[in-house]
Amino acid sequence: MGQFRNRYKYGTMLYLAGPITSDKAARKTFKKAQQALEDAGYTVVNPFEIDPSRIFTDFFKLQGDEKERAHLRADIAEMMKCDGIASLPLTTTSSGMARELHLAHSLNMTVMPFEWWIPRGTDVPF
């Protein structure tokens, strides 16, 4: 683990992965995690800040599963630009998070729990 802290330093871009659809507190949890990682010097991609309509011009016409898949595809497009993945605790089931982590692992991206990315002794905000 120490080797990752030495390798991934200030300016490293991390994607936050965690349950969204089934977690009512997700937006707040993601924002707190983003702030903690930014305070540690990382650049953070928060899926709540990704606008799928920039990729899918008909996004606002989509409904149900099509809309969820468009969100996930837009998130994955941004995730691919990152150096690593900070995974939030799995508080509920999340097929989107499972897909993101499966893809990240299959592409040999560094995936670690959120708290492994921040310095020891830092309060975990959730």
Image (cartoon, helix red, strand yellow):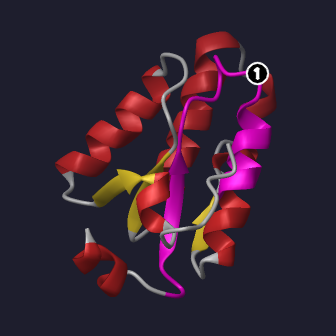
User: Mark 1, residues whose alpha carbon is within 10 Å: few (<14), some, or many (≥20)?
Assistant: few
Please provide percent x and percent y for residue 120.
Answer: 48, 69
In the picture, measured across the screen, residue 113 lies left or right of residue 42, that is: left
Which residue in the rendered view is the most extreme toward the top? 64
Q: Residue at x 44, y 21 (%)?
A: 95
In the picture, measured across the screen, residue 36 lies left or right of residue 8, that is: right
Q: Residue at x 39, y 64 (%)?
A: 84
Please provide percent x and percent y for residue 23.
Answer: 67, 22
Closer to the camera in the image, 16 or 4: 4
Of the 4 image quadrants, the one containing the N terminus is bottom left
Quadrant of residue 36 in the image? bottom right
Magenta-tinted stretch: 10-33
Quadrant of residue 28 in the image? top right
Please provide percent x and percent y for residue 26.
Answer: 71, 33
Please provide percent x and percent y for residue 7.
Answer: 31, 84
The answer to whether residue 50 is seen in the rendering is: no
Callout 1 secondary element: loop
Of the 4 image quadrants, the one containing the C terminus is top right
**Residue at the disc numbered 1:** 24
Q: Residue at x 49, y 54 (%)?
A: 114
Name above or below for residue 11 compared with residue 118.
Answer: below
The answer to whether residue 97 is seen in the rendering is: yes
Instruction: Verify whether residue 13 appears in magenta.
Output: yes
Name above or below for residue 52 compared with residue 4.
Answer: above
Q: Residue at x 55, y 46 (%)?
A: 75
In this figure, what is the number of numbered marks? 1
Name above or below for residue 70 compared with residue 107.
Answer: above
User: Residue type at mark 1?
Assistant: Lys
In the picture, measured across the screen, residue 30 lies left or right of residue 10, that is: right
Instruction: Verify whether residue 117 appears in magenta.
Output: no
Closer to the camera in the image, 9 or 1: 1
